[in-house]
């Protein structure tokens, strides 16, 4: 894959930007900005939480991988990026590497970047791959994973557990072609030219077909870019799929963190009573913990305030949240395993109600949207009024 300038630091920055975009549709995913083919289900390695970059150490063998169709066109541009496409004629014809047929006309897709630091991410996503029963796999192969973690200094100080950031790629969303482009200068242009099917496969602009593969005849650029293309070479059809995003399981000691998206050292419950309510909430959290034993924490939250109960251990189970409103109703929420549900480490309980008309409490849900919905929103936000 091509870096048009020596841009390791740039790669790190772009990967976080891409990850933040992808998490609008999948909260639990990491971006694969560099289109690293080593990001595959069962790959063992580390993620730097400051960059989101996965570094592979090895791959687990003898895994059952499920491959499910998941077709989506992905074409996300910064608001300062303008995308255009035009038909082109090839003098004397051009042999399409995807079909091996000679074609006389093709497609050119161009991106105009008004600002330095703008990005465009493009792909035709076709498949979601995952490790079957990955929780069981991580449990049963813990000893082997611990040995690998020790070899790269990711074991806990006592040598009995694994530090967060080391783990296994469990899911990927893969594409038949892709183009991730970032401008290192303002007022710059990048373009890809090739067969209609090959270019559309790379830029998320066509209908997904079983035999469609990404390819391009040439690229052109003005000024400087960091670009990652799949396939990586011109006049070559993509021979394998490439992950645009992935999910990752890590550990905290011996506790499996099935969807790790950032370092978490304890859980917290945020009680938000800032919704115009007047009731006082007496809030309590109870849980069991293999490492600390039974636990109980409480706080009182008047109307107009927000309080947090923190320090809940990561191995907490059978957790119960109770909100007892003075002169109001009681609400109880049971969470059998926070490690499976609280991916960000925090749960928020929204509290409301004006006396004497009744009190209310509910656990706040995190909204995610489909790729198609996100594309529709992005288009609406960028369109002139």
Image (cartoon, rainbow, N blue to C red):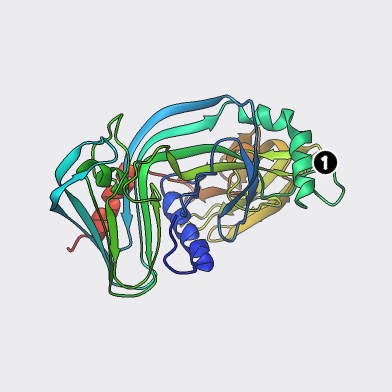
The answer to whether 56 appears left or right of 178 in the picture is: right
Q: Residue at x 49, y 62 (%)?
A: 11
The answer to whether 252 appears left or right of 277 in the picture is: right
Which of the pair 72/287 is nearer the observer? 72
Which of the pair 322/2 is nearer the observer? 2
> Looking at the image, which residue sits at the far front?
92
The answer to whether 270 appears left or right of 149 in the picture is: left
Quadrant (top left, top right, bottom left, bottom right) of the N terminus: bottom left
Above or below residue 100? Residue 114 is below
Q: Is residue 361 visible?
A: no
Q: Residue at x 76, y 35 (%)?
A: 144
Report x, y in % for residue 72: 33, 39
Mark 1: give few (<14), some (14-19) or many (20+) Cα within 10 Å.
few
Residue 286 figure quarter: top right
> Looking at the image, which residue sits at the far right?
158
Which of the pair 291/221 is nearer the observer? 221
Residue 329 figure quarter: top right
Callout 1 secondary element: loop
Report x, y in % for residue 29: 50, 46
Quadrant (top left, top right, bottom left, bottom right) of the C terminus: bottom left
Which of the pair 65/107 is nearer the observer? 107
Report x, y in % for residue 338: 64, 39
Q: Which residue is mark 1?
A: 291
Above or below residue 206? Residue 355 is below
């Amino acid at each position: 894959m091509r870096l048009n300038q020596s841009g390791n630091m740039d790669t790190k920055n772009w990967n976080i930007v891409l990850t933040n975009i992808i998490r609008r549709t999948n909260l639990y995913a990491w971006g694969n900005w560099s289109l690293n083919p080593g990001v595959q289900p069962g790959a063992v390695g580390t993620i730097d939480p400051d960059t989101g970059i996965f570094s592979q150490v090895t791959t687990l063998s003898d895994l059952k991988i499920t491959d499910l169709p998941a077709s989506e066109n992905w074409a996300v541009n910064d608001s300062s990026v303008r995308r255009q496409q035009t038909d082109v004629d090839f003098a004397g014809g051009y042999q399409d590497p995807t079909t091996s047929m000679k074609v006389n006309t093709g497609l050119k897709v161009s991106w105009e970047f008004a600002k330095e630091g703008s990005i465009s991410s493009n792909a035709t996503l076709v498949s979601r791959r995952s490790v079957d029963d990955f929780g069981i796999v991580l449990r049963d192969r813990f000893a082997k994973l611990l040995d690998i973690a020790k070899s790269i200094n990711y074991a806990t100080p006592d040598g009995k557990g694994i530090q967060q950031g080391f783990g296994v790629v469990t899911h990927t969303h893969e594409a038949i072609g892709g183009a991730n482009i970032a401008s290192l200068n303002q007022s710059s242009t990048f373009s890809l030219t090739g067969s209609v099917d090959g270019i559309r496969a790379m830029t998320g602009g066509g209908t997904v077909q079983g035999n469609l593969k990404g390819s391009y005849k040439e690229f052109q650029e003005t000024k400087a870019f960091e670009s990652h293309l799949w396939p990586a070479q011109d006049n070559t059809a993509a021979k394998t799929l490439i992950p645009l995003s992935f999910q990752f399981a890590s550990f905290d000691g011996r506790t499996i963190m099935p969807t790790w998206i950032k370092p978490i050292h304890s859980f917290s419950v945020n009680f938000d009573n800032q919704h115009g309510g007047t009731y006082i909430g007496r809030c309590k959290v109870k849980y069991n913990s293999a490492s600390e034993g039974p636990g109980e924490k409480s706080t009182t939250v008047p109307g107009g305030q927000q309080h947090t109960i923190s320090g809940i251990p990561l191995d907490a189970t059978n957790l119960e949240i109770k909100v007892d409103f003075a002169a109001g109703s009681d609400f109880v929420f049971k969470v059998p395993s926070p490690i499976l549900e609280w991916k960000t480490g925090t749960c928020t309980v929204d509290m409301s109600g004006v006396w004497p008309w009744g009190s209310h409490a509910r656990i706040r849900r995190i909204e995610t949207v489909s790729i198609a919905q996100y594309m529709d929103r992005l288009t609406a936000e960028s369109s002139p009024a």
